[in-house]
Image: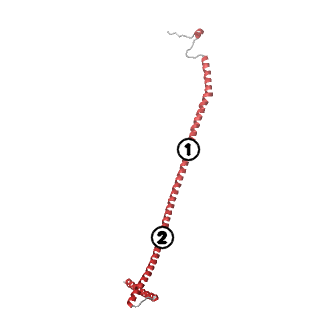
Amino acid sequence: MTTLVLPLSEAAAGEDVNPLLPHTPEIIFGFVFLVLLAILFAKVVVPKFEKAYADRTAAIEGGMEDAKQAQAEAKAALDKYNAQLAEARQEAAKIREDAREQGAQIIAEMREQANAEAERIVTHARTQIDAERAQAVASLRSEVGTMATTLAGRIVGESLEDEARQRRTVERFLAELEESESARQAVGTDR
């Protein structure tokens, strides 16, 4: 048989001690300590946990609000960028069209100036040619007249030194030449 060793105080009291049941003062002391611990936990630790939880929740919600606001700002910026891009494309198309119109206008003006310059050059050349022709005709008349009077004087045997008579003779001779030339050209064009 086994013998149990009991504490002296209990053995002296001679009571039967149940080893499974704790002593009453221990139960009271444990209960008071548990209540004090629960009060201390409720007053100190739980508010700190609640505050940390509230701060964390506020931070998460604030972050979500910031994210929503940033997303809205990004969407607004994208819309603004797209509007500016469309406006820039329209402006570029307008500038290209204006440049084409100005180019066509400049080309038309340059053609007009070139045509006017060409016409001026042709007119000037014709005037110069007419002046040179008149000068050549006058020079030829003078030379032909001089040669004709000299020749006529040799043929006739009399001097045609009189200037008035010489001029009439030369003019009559040239008129006859012009008539014969005109008649020859008229016959050539009839064919």
- In the rendered view, tell whether residue 169 sits above or below residue 77: below
Q: Secondary structure at mark 2?
A: helix
Q: CA distance from mark 1 to mark 2?
A: 68 Å
What is the x, y in percent for residue 136?
A: 43, 79
Which residue corresponds to mark 2?
117
- Front residue (pair 59, 50): 59
Which residue corresponds to mark 1?
70
- Front residue (pair 117, 93): 117
Dot placed on the residue nearer the N-terminal end, 1 or 2: 1
Residues at discs 1 and 2 in contact (Cβ within 8 Å): no
What is the x, y in percent for residue 153?
A: 40, 89
Q: Residue at x 43, y 83 (%)?
A: 142
Q: Residues within 10 Å of mark 2 (few under 14, many from 20)?
A: few
What is the x, y in percent for residue 61?
A: 57, 39
Lateral position of residue 180 relative to residue 71, left or right = left
Q: Residue at x 62, y 23 (%)?
A: 36
User: What number of labels is visible?
Assistant: 2
Amino acid type for the residue under numbered disc 2:
Glu
- In the rendered view, tell whether residue 146 sits above or below residue 40: below
Amino acid type for the residue under numbered disc 1:
Ala
Quarter in which the C terminus is drawn: bottom left
- In the rendered view, tell whether residue 44 sits above or below residue 16: below
